[in-house]
Amino acid sequence: MARRLRGGLRLNATGRFAPSPTGTLHLGNLRTALLAWLYARAQGAPFLVRIEDLDTGRVRERFEREQLADLAALGLDWDGAPVRQSERRALYEDALARLDADGIVYPCWCTRAEIREASSAPHGPLPEGHYPGTCRRLTAAQRAEREASGRPPALRVDSGAAEIAFVDRLHGAQRGLVDDFVVRRNDGAFAYNLAVVVDDGAQGIGEIVRGDDLLDSTPRQLWLADRLHLPRPTFAHVPLVLGPDGARLAKRHGAVTLADRLEQGETADEVRARLAVSVGLADDDERPSPAELAARFDPDRFAPPPSGPLPGLWTG
């Protein structure tokens, strides 16, 4: 854990928000951004923005501009210029080379259907849905046959079914098994788990605040950080905003972006207040500024309600 400074501030509490510019941020994304900003600023720490733009087929420059504008409109500032993953491929190449030099990377030719079938079958200690290492167990002849097929393989790590324990600020003690996850896709793109671990290490991120739908990916990322000799960050997995149907918030739920709310007559200050009220950081009649929210936010005491709809969003 980070060491406390006088006055309750922490060392190594640098935070970040890392959106993918593949669409407009909705209110759930913006609430997570607000909480990530508050965790960092309340501890006197830097807050960074990273653009996760490796999915070149879906990335659009206009979405990046809109996302940064939405953060600024809500009063969420950041330190330094945003970095883009598309400009950091050399870092990922180096990390992959180090893993390969350690002998823990192997090619995988499995199709999605084969992966689904393998993941749903009983295969020892790994829970259902985890890749059981099918291609790791290929004979030399089987590997030669797949190489001759001409189908490019993905690259996976041999995790040895490692078990990783960690403590999340909001979820407490956690423990999970690590499967042989992908670090480079068969189209040559670096996988999310590799890129995010390398970036967090390179940027000195001390605390990661993100949606609790990513809680299950944390053991993989901590295992990878250990293998790359990177310091482990701490985590706070915050609740998600849900739609009125109980599903994770999406554009199909209606006016759920900042632009939508502005068109409906709300101000950016009112939207920020709505987000703060939904996690118990403000009263219904308050319009606290970002600085006021940071002053009242206590990372050690913050206990938000579970995932659910934003109060009043669909009832006026």
Image (cartoon, grey):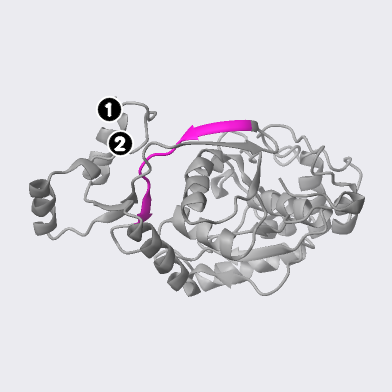
Q: Is residue 267 visible?
A: no
Q: Main secondary structure of the magenta part?
A: strand
Give the residue at mark 2: 132
Front-lying residue, 232 or 174: 232
Image location (x, y in percent) of residue 1? 71, 45
Relative to 167, is 297 on the left or the right? right
Residue at 29% from the left image edge and 27% from the top image edge: 123
Neighbourhood count class around disc 1 (C-alpha, 10 Å): few under 14, some 14–19, many 20 upward? some
Q: Quadrant of residue 152?
A: bottom left
Mark 2, secondary structure of its residue: loop
CB within 8 Å, label 1 to label 2: yes
Q: Quadrant of residue 147?
A: bottom left
Magenta highlight on residue 175: yes
Image location (x, y in percent) of residue 159? 38, 43
Image location (x, y in percent) of residue 279? 77, 39
Q: Is residue 182 visible?
A: yes
> From the viewer's perspective, is the residue at label 1 or at label 2 nearer?
2
Is residue 290 placed above or below 136 in the rendered structure? below
Q: CA distance from mark 1 to mark 2?
A: 9 Å
Relative to 99, is 306 on the left or the right? right
Relative to 131, is 279 on the left or the right? right
Residue at 71% from the left image edge and 52% from the top image edge: 36
Amino acid type at image mark 1:
Ala
Give the residue at mark 1: 121
| Residue extent of the magenta highlight | 173-184
